[in-house]
Amino acid sequence: MLEIGTTAPAFSLPDQNGAMHTLEEYRGKKVILYFYPKDNTPGCTKQACGFGENYPQFLEKGAVVLGVSKDSVKSHKNFETKYQLPFTLLSDPKLEVIKAYDVWKEKKNYGKVAMGVVRTTYLIDENGIIVKAFDNVKAADNPAQMLKELE
């Protein structure tokens, strides 16, 4: 996990519509950058829907929400449509940003060890500095936790 107080790594990734997004374009706003393992899985769906339900409050507090996984643009589009998600989902199939943010780790699942995305959420301030970092977050609780962090 990246250190609090460090500059967030720059990125350029496509969203669920294929449009490119960079961290730089969000200067002046708080960014909740959350990394999740896979579209349409129970935990990831709970987390995304929680961010979706609370999205107006995030906007009121001057924050944007960006979800990142290694899923394809098409997978993200289906996920967004199915759950009517109002925020941006970024596709990182080459793991460039996932690795830059240090969330690609060894994971154990039913005794099997494999590499994967560890559910991690960063709060980046208006100047691009990481001010909060949470790893192994609980999917269902993360949106409310991040709203609290913005107060």
Image (cartoon, grey):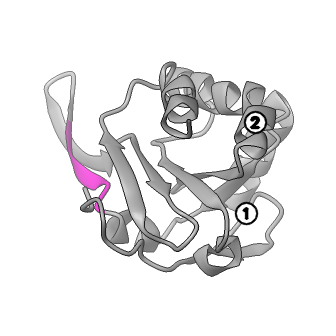
Specify the quadrant that holds the C terminus: top right
Residue at coordinates 52% horizontally, 35% vertically from top-left?
Answer: 146
The circle drawn on residue 113 is none
Tell me if residue 8 is in the magenta stretch: no
Q: Which residue is mark 1?
A: 15
**Does label 2 or label 1 sit earlier along the sequence?**
1
Disc 2 on helix, strand or loop?
A: helix
Q: Which residue is mark 2?
A: 55
- Provide the major secondary structure of the magenta segment: strand
> Three-letter amino acid code at disc 2?
Tyr
Horizontal and vertical percent position of residue 132: 37, 49
In front of the other: 22 or 90: 22
- Location of residue 4 with respect to 48 vertically, above or below: below
The answer to whether 3 appears left or right of 150 in the picture is left
Q: Which residues are magenta?
A: 102-107
Which picture quadrant has residue 74? bottom right
Tell me if residue 106 is in the magenta stretch: yes
In front of the other: 8 or 93: 8
**Gap between marks 2 and 1 measured at Cα:** 17 Å
The answer to whether 1 appears left or right of 144 in the picture is left
Q: Is residue 44 visible in this depiction of the protein?
A: no
- Location of residue 137 with respect to 25 vertically, above or below: above
Residue at coordinates 65% horizontally, 25% vertically from top-left?
Answer: 50
